[in-house]
Image (tube, rainbow, N blue to C red):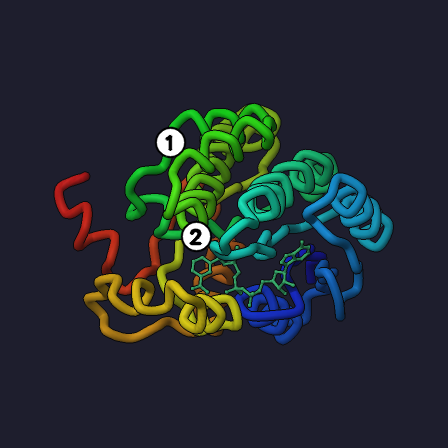
Amino acid sequence: MGTYAVTGAASGIGAATAERLRRDGHHVIGVDRNDSDVTADLSSAAGRSAAVSGVLERAAGRLDGAVLAAGLGPGKGRERMVTEVNVLGVTDLLDSWRPALAAAGDAKVVVLGSNSATTTPLVPRGAVHALLDGDVDVAVRRIRRRMGVTGPVAYAASKIAVTHWCRQRAVADDWAGVGIRLNVIAPGPVMTPFLRSQLDSPNGAQVRAFPLPARRYGTPEQIAEWIAMMLSPAADSLVGSVIVVDGGTDALIRTRDW
Ligand code: NAI
């Protein structure tokens, strides 16, 4: 049985994934702001560093996989926190855990993206580039120029950036070349506290109005099943892929993008 780090393990998709992996007999090291094996705030450099070391101590130098599910949704005035948690809360951790993942020989990593990355208009590319350069200040300045839609734009920019980062790393010699499989899952709306807070926010009407061909929200348990598959030997050839599980919104909006 393997050892897996799961961020965001206290709620929603991360909690369902941790539960799914534990049911299969794996050792799960949860990371979250509260109620987890490693308590760390991923919105600060110190918190990310605590998450890195807390997991490495418990994993004894070898990780069979990781699931990066900690994330924050759009919210007025929290552009910086969203980008720090959703981007640096993935990239800083994975870069530091890479040697432990390589030590496993066939580790698998799943990062939570979002279909917001492909369905949100007005995302400034310059903000995404700044995030990929690790320059949160510049990214936030560029996002704040999109007055009126800064919350959704910050969220989408964070998910585009983290997806690009994963696809770049996934094919590199020190990732794919040493057996690490790094992939992204991009859900649409999944009924978790995250979605509940979006539905209850002043933007709730817009969230409800977003086209959803399947006409029902996903569940965290369903996403956990997809993640379990992406962590299994069935995913040995899955490298830098983005698996969209979103009730059809992306296909509806981008029908001809294939
Ligand atoms: P959730 O809100 O139920 O769980 C997120 C977890 O992340 C929480 O336990 C929270 O404490 C943790 N977290 C947030 N900020 C943190 C910080 N600063 N430090 C440490 N932990 C922190 O959300 P859900 O729905 O399970 O989301 C998981 C991931 O899936 C997120 O990355 C989200 O962007 C993504 N996603 C969710 C969708 C949805 O509709 N629920 C749709 C598309 C993507």
Give the residue at x 49% y 42%.
158
Residue 25 point in image, percent of width and height: 68, 71
- Looking at the image, which residue sits at the far left? 256
Q: Residues within 10 Å of mark 1 (few under 14, many from 20)?
A: some
C-alpha separation, residue under disc 1 versus residue under disc 2: 23 Å
Q: Which residue is mark 2?
A: 185
Residue 15 point in image, percent of width and height: 61, 70
Which label number is shown at residue 248? none
Q: Residues within 10 Å of mark 2 (few under 14, many from 20)?
A: many
Q: Could you say which quadrant of the image residue 4 lies in? A: bottom right
Instruction: Tell me the element at label 2.
Output: strand
Give the residue at x 23% y 70%.
214
Q: In terms of depth relative to the viewer, which is nearer, 3 or 258?
A: 258
Residue 209 point in image, percent of width and height: 25, 66
Instruction: Tell me the element at label 1.
Output: loop
- In the picture, measured across the screen, residue 151 lies left or right of residue 35, that is left
Q: Which residue is mark 1?
A: 124
Where's the C terminus, which quadrant?
A: top left
User: What is the total number of numbered labels drawn onto the structure image?
Assistant: 2
Answer with mark 1 or mark 2, whichever residue precedes in sequence: 1
Q: Amino acid at mark 2?
A: Ile
CB of mark 1 within 8 Å of CB of mark 2? no
Tell whether circle 2 marks a residue whose Cβ is less than 8 angstroms from ligand 1. no
Give the residue at x 58% y 64%.
14
